[in-house]
Amino acid sequence: ASGGLSIPSTGTDGTGHRCIKKLGHSMIGPYPALTPLTGSHPGSEELPGVSLDVEARVQNTPFSMSDTPRSGFVFTHQGYSGPSMLDLSHHIVRKLDNKEKASPILVNWASKSKEEWQSELEGKAVVHNVLRKYLPNRLVDALCKEIEFSNRKYSELKRSDRDLLLEKLTAYPLKSDGHLGYKKAEVTGGGIPLEEINPATMESRLLPGLYLCGEILDVFGRIGGFNFYWAWVSGRLAGKSVR
């Protein structure tokens, strides 16, 4: 029950991972999970503190935040955080740590469909005035820097401009260039593969008499208490199984 590498100020340094690997277990390379991401804000604006509920997904991945209630989003001084971003962060972290290009996170700022936005915009109001009804003013200002025609009415826009506007509102590509690592990570991803333990007792299949639980194993869940739950349940099972 040695934990992982997350929040090193508590003393976690990966000792357990290193010891178990030396004893013969395989190891799925650990990485920070549920950690804030870094990157520029829309319109190259500074939006720290702006928060709202969104739907988000990583482009070209099947995981979608719209399948869960975790929609909180906040701009930080360095990038983005909140439950919606933390839940997606492992997709980005693993790519960046492998020196690969990470896919953008597509954000639906108001959780509205394109059809719903069209219905809202098709009146006589100027585009940016409509956006202010549903989005924080600072975010609207930032988006409008990228949407040069936002001071016009939706009905006056060309088809291509309408399509661009709807795309910015429902699938805005946030690009991440880094993350805040283990210092801010809620949990450690990776670890000992589950097939190397007996799930009924948490005993090692390779080292009889050794019981493993919690973050040293390759298990983590989304934000919201699931990782605490795994730690307690797996720890209790390991403790009760020891003879």
Image: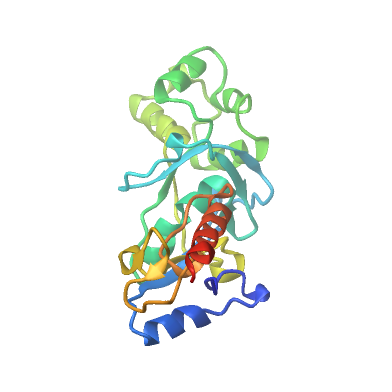
| Residue 170 seen in the figure | yes
Residue 48's place in the image compared with 120, above or below, is below
Q: Is residue 197 left or right of residue 112?
A: left
Choose top left, top right, bottom left or bottom right for residue 100. Answer: bottom left
User: Residue at (52%, 24%) from the top-left corner?
Assistant: 152
Residue 97 in sight in this render: no
Picture coordinates of residue 193, whole percent (x, y): 34, 67
Q: Position of residue 124 (x, y in %)?
A: 54, 13
Percent x, y for residue 230? 51, 55
Q: Quadrant of the N terminus?
A: bottom right
Q: Is residue 71 left or right of residue 22?
A: right
Q: How many callouts does the rendering have?
A: 0
**Of all residues shown, which one is farthest toward the top?**
123
Which residue is at a point 32% across and 72% down the rendered structure image?
Answer: 205
Is residue 210 found left or right of 12 in the rendered image? left
Q: Position of residue 111 (x, y in %)?
A: 50, 30
